């Protein structure tokens, strides 16, 4: 469905929710965040957003618009040049011991998936338990029995029952995504970050993976932040969609079923936004 059609069907509410950091429902808060890789050019500018716990949040934008950078900021892999970020009351920063300890709360799936090709599905999923069992034990393959049981349960949950011992490089694209999701779930996360994990898949497989994430997200009451370059999937699955263009948030919509319940446009005229996103049918 095009954004234009969706907007026609909706009854936009005039009350734009004012969210604040003291609201305990908020898991992620960004306030006027700017980010740069070289200190000169800004890949993200003036990003302000709040993501409530339990939300399925989508970030949509063209290639190079800053989507991956946004996830890296939430994950603490990159620090903002300016502005504040809070994730579950913490300032993300990989260099800080405290945040690294907290990191297992965040299941991050990079666009490349980051799987180890030459090891089995089970071993890849067990990597998600590393923060709990320690690197040395894992090198010695000393995984506690209950963690192995847990990993097998999750492998079943993502639909890979019977493929525990298969080497990861032998799997299809869809199956690899399932392993990456299972590894993230093994972390027992409260937040799932996924960077364009369905972009390279055919429509049917992409929907299977989206269904899987949506199901896990609801079942485990996770907050999910998923990056897409396809508006269609975002509108279908997310509760909120933020559109990023050239490093700026130009639009954010809240969706309930097929109704738009909140519409906030950034610094781009609404007409221009429509022209950008009404060409998919
Ligand atoms: N490691 C990097 N070093 C320098 N510039 C980068 C790096 N990663 C991304 N960029 C730049 O930041 C901008 C946003 O990139 P990115 O967040 O990867 O966009 P997207 O994920 O939407 O494709 C782009 O202009 C890109 O060239
Ligand atoms: Mg990217």
Image (cartoon, grey):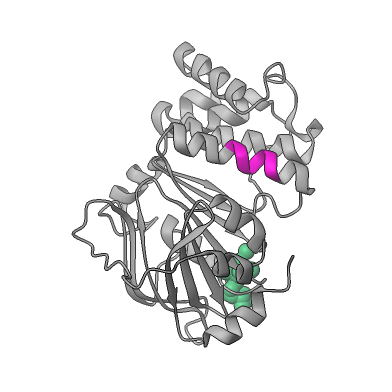
Q: Quadrant of ligand 1?
A: bottom right
Report the residue at 64% width, 46% height from top: 113
- Image vertical order of residue 168 relative to residue 21, above or below: above
The quarter holding residue 123 reads top right
Left or right relative to 209: residue 245: left
Magenta stretch: dominant secondary structure = helix
- Image vertical order of residue 239 relative to residue 265, above or below: above
Which residue appears farthest toward the left when viewing the image? 22
Q: How many labels does the image show?
A: 0
Report the residue at 54% width, 70% height from top: 243
Is residue 206 visible in the rendered structure shown here? yes
Image quadrant holding the C terminus, namely: bottom right
Q: Where is residue 122? Give x, y as percent.
A: 62, 23
- Image vertical order of residue 195 relative to residue 245, above or below: above
Left or right relative to 199: residue 259: left
Judging depth in this view, the residue of 99 and 105 nearest the camera is: 105
Q: Where is residue 210? Give x, y as percent.
A: 62, 43
Report the residue at 77% width, 43% height from top: 204
Is residue 141 visible in the rendered structure shown here? no
Q: Where is residue 169? Give x, y as percent.
A: 78, 35
Image quadrant holding the N terminus, namely: bottom right
Q: Where is residue 121? Give x, y as percent.
A: 67, 27
Judging depth in this view, the residue of 153 and 58 nearest the camera is: 58
Judging depth in this view, the residue of 258 and 158 nearest the camera is: 258
Which contiguous range is marked in magenta? 207-212
Say if the magenta span includes residue 242: no
């Amino acid at each position: 469905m095009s954004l234009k059609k969706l907007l026609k069907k909706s009854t936009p509410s005039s009350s734009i929710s004012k969210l604040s950091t003291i609201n305990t429902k908020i898991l992620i808060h960004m306030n006027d965040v700017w980010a740069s890789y070289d200190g000169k050019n800004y890949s993200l500018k003036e990003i302000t957003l709040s993501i409530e716990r339990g939300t399925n949040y989508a970030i949509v934008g063209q290639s190079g618009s800053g989507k991956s950078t946004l996830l890296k900021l939430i994950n603490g892999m990159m620090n903002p040049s300016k502005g504040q970020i809070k994730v579950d009351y913490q300032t993300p920063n990989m260099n800080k011991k405290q945040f690294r300890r907290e990191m297992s709360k965040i299941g991050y799936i990079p666009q490349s998936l980051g799987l180890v090709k030459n090891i089995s599905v089970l071993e890849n999923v067990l990597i998600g338990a590393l923060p709990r069992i320690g690197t040395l034990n894992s090198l010695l393959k000393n995984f506690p029995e209950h963690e192995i049981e847990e990993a097998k349960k999750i492998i079943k949950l993502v639909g890979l029952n019977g493929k525990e011992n298969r080497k990861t490089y032998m799997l299809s694209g869809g199956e690899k995504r399932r392993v990456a999701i299972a590894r993230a779930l093994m972390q027992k996360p409260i937040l799932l970050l996924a960077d364009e994990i369905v972009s390279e898949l055919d429509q049917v497989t992409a929907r299977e993976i989206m269904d899987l994430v949506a199901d896990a997200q609801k079942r485990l009451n996770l907050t999910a932040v998923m990056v897409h370059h396809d508006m269609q999937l975002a509108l279908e699955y997310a509760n909120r969609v933020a559109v990023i263009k050239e490093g700026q948030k130009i639009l954010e919509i809240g969706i309930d079923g097929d109704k738009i319940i909140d519409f906030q446009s950034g610094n781009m005229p609404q007409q221009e936004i429509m022209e950008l996103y009404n060409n998919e049918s």
